[in-house]
Amino acid sequence: MIELPGGPSTRLSAGQISQLSVVLRMLESDEHAPTAVRAAKQALDVHVADSLAALELDSIRAARTIADLGSGAGFPGLALAVALPAAEVSLVESQRRRCEFLERACAGAQIENARVVWARAEEWRHGLAGNEAVVARALAAPPVVLEYAAPLLVLGGSLVDWRGRRARQEEDRAAGAAAELGLERVEIRKVEPFPGARDHHLHLYLKVRDTPARFPRRAGMARKRPLGG
């Protein structure tokens, strides 16, 4: 069993903690787990607690459809699916082997409200305008994440982008991209998800206008020619 740091937003039931414990054990035991952080004690902080920091945001706690882009080993998506059992969480991942791990993790921990989507974010047509929240952690530069997320959000939906130390130039480029995509940054919240964490920030965007029909651009273009430059 594991113990989570934090306040009321990270208080989980015994059953939820048991599910997360299974995921952590799988990170240790599954040789194909797609992460360099595999020891359960370290992963509890680096992956689970860091993911659950998003529960500080009202928009995440209220969301009923969440897409985790570039889910990798399942964070933040798996942790949020456990913490928010009323939400439907899509784990969007383009690499097949990572998807196979995610399927094993969902089955092993009995996380029934998460589903694995084998697709690039730009090519996930079924997800267009269908998510109340999109989350992304260590995925790509901010303008790229914004372009991936905007078409997938419902009007009024939220994007949460996990970032480290703040950088003015990077934030200015992101603001320019957001305006082009129908998004507006409403908050940059500093969080301390675990002891020793430094310079962790959640960048929160709201979809305030319809995203122009030219988005998403074809696969690879967001990285090759990022917006906001």
Image: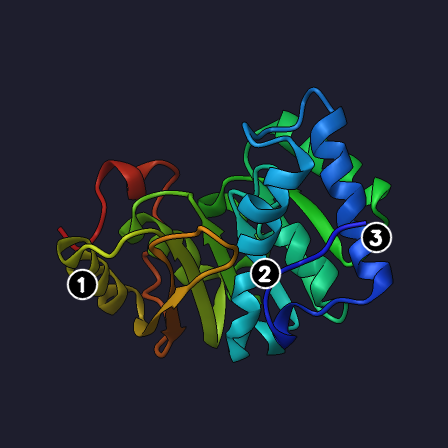
- Front label number (2 vs 1): 2
**Closer to the camera in the image, 103 or 73:** 73
Q: Are marks 2 and 3 in contact (CB under 8 Å)?
A: no
For marks 2 and 3, the one nearer the N-term is 3
Residue 224 pos. (x, y %): 25, 36
CA gap, disc 2 and disc 1: 28 Å
Q: Secondary structure at mark 2?
A: helix
Mark 2 nearby-residue class (10 Å; few <14, some 14–19, many ≥20): many
Residue 98 pos. (x, y %): 63, 31
The circle drawn on residue 87 is none
67 on left or right of 181? right
**Closer to the camera in the image, 30 or 146:** 30
The circle drawn on residue 176 is 1
For the question of whether residue 7 can be seen, the reply is: yes
- According to the picture, the residue beneath numbered tag 2 turns out to be 52
Q: Are marks 2 and 1 in contact (CB under 8 Å)?
A: no
Q: Are marks 3 and 1 in contact (CB under 8 Å)?
A: no
For marks 3 and 1, the one nearer the N-term is 3
The correct choice, above or below, for 221 with respect to 113 in the image is above
Residue 143 pos. (x, y %): 27, 52
211 on left or right of 94? left
Residue type indicated by callout 2: Leu
Residue 52 falls in image quadrant: bottom right
- According to the picture, the residue beneath numbered tag 3 turns out to be 18
Residue type indicated by callout 1: Gly
For marks 2 and 1, the one nearer the N-term is 2
CA gap, disc 3 and disc 1: 43 Å
Q: Secondary structure at mark 1?
A: helix
The correct choice, above or below, for 113 with respect to 63 in the image is above
Q: Residue drawn at (85%, 40%), measured in percent from left and top?
A: 108
Residue type indicated by callout 3: Ser
